[in-house]
Amino acid sequence: MNNQFIATEKANILIVDDTLENLRLLSNMLTQEGYKVRGVPKGQKAIATAQLAPPDLILLDIMMPEMDGFEVCQQLKAEEKTRDIPVIFLSALNDTLDKIKAFSVGGVDYITKPFHVEEVLARVENQLRLRSLQKQLLEQNTILQKQIRERQVLEKRLRDSEAEMRGFFEAMSDIVLFINGEDNSIKIAPTNPDRFYPPDTDILGQTIELFSGEKAEIFNSKIKQAREIQQPINFEYSLELENQQIWFIASIAPTSENTVVWVARDISDRILAEAAQKRRAIIDNLLGNISRAFLDQDIDTAIDFTLSKIGEYTGSDRSYIIRFCDQQKYLSMTHEWCAKTAVPPTQLLQEIPCETFPWMYEQLLLGKTVLISDVDNLPPEAVADKTALTRLSTRSLINIPLLHRNQLVGCIGLVTVHAAKQWTEEEINLLKLVGEIVAIGLARNDAEIERQQAAAAAFAASKAKSEFLANMSHELRTPLTAILGLSEVLREETFGPLTAKQHQKLATIEQSGQHLLELINDVLDLSKIEAGKMELQLAPTDISGLCNASLAFVRQQAHQKRIQLTCQVPPQIGKIEIDERRMRQVLINLLSNSVKFTPEGGAVWLEVQADREREIVQFSVVDTGIGIAPQDINKLFRPFVQLEGALNRRYAGTGLGLALVRQVVELHGGSISLESEVGKGSRFTVSVPWRQKSEAIAHQESCISYPYCFNLNQVLIVEDSAPAAEQVAHYLLELGVKNYTIHSLGTGTTAAALQLNPDAIILDLQLPDRSGWDVLAQLRSEQKTQHIPILIVSVADEPARTGDLGVCEYLVKPFSRHQFQLALRKLIAKRDATDNPKPAAETTPLILLAEDSETTIYTIVEYLEVKGYRMATALNGIQAVQMTKQLKPDLVLMDIQIPEMDGLEATRQIRADGEIAATPIIALTSLALPGDREKCLEAGATEYLTKPVSLKKLTEAIAQFVVRS
């Protein structure tokens, strides 16, 4: 009978796999090859199916629920009916231990998923052939034994049959041999004999002891085990043949009482592939850890980690990093690792001339790898290198160049000191990859150091600039404070009447002082903008008034040159939201330049145009001056840049004006453009967003302008400059404050405050004996003085430092009467907002006003106090809720547009608090839009009034809810 036919014809195959997709794939594949296929998804069902109708072969998955493939195979091999069925394991498990276990429980083969169709078919076919062959051998052996017993004449036929079988075995790719069980002698010579024992060795009749003692012991134990349990034994082993280590997987199965068959397959390729795969995984993991170290750790920690890992992996005694310095004339070992079993690490080489290793240095310069397996075998041209390396106890060495932007910056190396080493291709490639990572890390670290140095230099330059500006501001503002303050006092004839000529001289002094102050402010403003510290104070501004005020500033200068000034402002523009002071600064600068560069008898005019579609307002300053050449236009807006020298001498200036103009305009979200022609004139156009003010708010502000009472009984002035102190005292007297004390030193300020218990303190920061900040901190640390309002005056613009120092306001010297009064108003308003209201008769109703507009606060508070009400003020919604809980007022006047928490939310929170929920609340709003009244009442307001509100109407509304005795 044909062996192929016996092995495959109508063979029954049972597939056991819990994955339906695998069942379908394997079933279709084997069915197409003519096999009869059954498939089951569970191990228990597979055992039952095999018992009911034993298949010729089982394909068994390992990872299954309830019962895995190993247990299924053990149970099959334990049963007489199924123990001889060959089992091929088919699994995604690729670990060697899993494969060993598969063969140990009785599997005859192991296929790793994902599999190739051809591989599965070949192995199935081979196992069916072996199973058929085993059956045939058993049957044949039975016949032969029977023939021997019955007839001696059949011996010749038996020998002939054995010879035929031996020929068949020798034609097989696997190793197959029969071993006599009595003495473990080889009964039939194996197939592929060269793969089992050294060539030209006659092994027939020899025992297993022909192998080495350890191998023979293992083989004998496996043969004995197979005979004892009468089941196949599977295991892996290796043999050294022709100086090569060859790996096999063997299956030893008993064929009769005294004979076993040994079937082995060469798996060296698989073993080598698995080993290579493991090494690749280790290397990938190593490279990943090194890369992460350079990302997460500092450079020294990352390099030390890297050197230790590659040194341990390659079995080197040392690993190191060398950097080249001083234009690559010297080398220094910056990092070194030494194995524990090696000699102690050498002292780090520092600034060694590169000519000490001329041959290696030349190789590195060329970008080549320096590879030395044995120092004794170096070429003659490397005699200097050999001498130096021998002195360093080096036997083998490999150096990989570190390149950054194709420039040699160093090398990374490995060294052995005990024995010579043949560096493998894998180790060389690994070190090259590590070298690339290290080179990138070193380059990044060098760049970071350069960045830090540049940042430190920039910070130092910025600090020096800031200190210079602060010192310049102090040195110039201090005398200006006295000049402007005294000129103002004298011009008001405080010390007696003045002649017209004296008034004229004082006006000149004041004008010059103001001009110098504006130049200082230009420098400081530009510095603020560049540092991103300037903030605009946007407020509704009347455009017509802004333009007229700007023209007034240059009117005298234009009059002297007989220049005609005109202004065109459309009446429909009204007010827009801008920073009035900054925009006036822009217009005055542009108008001053136009007047300056326009010849006598010329014209300068200011035009304003409103573009509703684009929502912008344009201010154009036009002149008939000397004009500007096209190539000079871009220079105009650069700081400290002026045009040609002849113009510098003829028209004085700092070169800051237009740079500051551009910055201020851009802060507004606008732009500036220039059209000019030499000899004919120029047109500067400033475009800013059109944010128009509502008419209700405009009317409200026009209605509220009542005087304000400061109510200060005693003021302490801490100022070392006599003129500045006199100026402050003069302003206080104008406000009706007659009791004040001047203290000229920082020392003793707290004692004076404790003695006087002033209502406010005016504190200069530049005191001769100590810093005003220290004085302020001391005042705030003393319990009896920590709540006194303090107005800080200084030539330095540092208001942000007052944030955590209690009730404070900040005023920059020199200042005008109006600026002083405004700062003092803000200070007293802060005090009133934080202090508890002064005690009053219980019959006097208390009204809480929640409002952020100082003008509105002053007007309503003064009016209602005259009407007999006690008043408290909250500047935002959060304060309104807190003060309502604390003071429990008789009524709350709630502005809806207040900061931090709007009036609607504040009203809701008051209504949600049971203790104050019944407090009457009158909502005040300037919007007066449809639905506003409903929103206010829905939030909990008792009444609703629109601004600008008539004070009489407000009083009548209050009277509806508050009864005065």
Image (tube, rainbow, N blue to C red):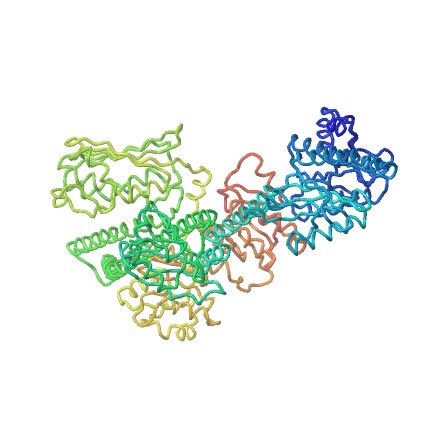
Which one is in front, 289 or 429? Answer: 429
Left or right, 31 with reference to 558: right
Q: Position of residue 879 (x, y in %)?
A: 54, 55
- Rendering quarter of residue 79: top right
Which one is in front, 894 or 221? Answer: 221
Point out the image quarter for the N terminus: top right
Name the residue: 32% across, 49% down.
Answer: 363
- Rendering quarter of residue 651: top left
Name above or below for residue 738 compared with residue 855: below
Q: Position of residue 166 (x, y in %)?
A: 70, 36
Which one is in front, 11 or 185? Answer: 185
- Rendering quarter of residue 484: bottom left
Point out the image quarter for the C terminus: bottom right
Q: Position of residue 728 (x, y in %)?
A: 32, 63
Left or right, 567 with reference to 577: left
Left or right, 679 with reference to 278: left
Total labels: the figure holds 0
Name the residue: 27% across, 49% down.
Answer: 522
Q: Position of residue 892 (x, y in %)?
A: 57, 51
Name above or below for residue 600 compared with residue 312: above
Which one is in front, 646 or 802? Answer: 646
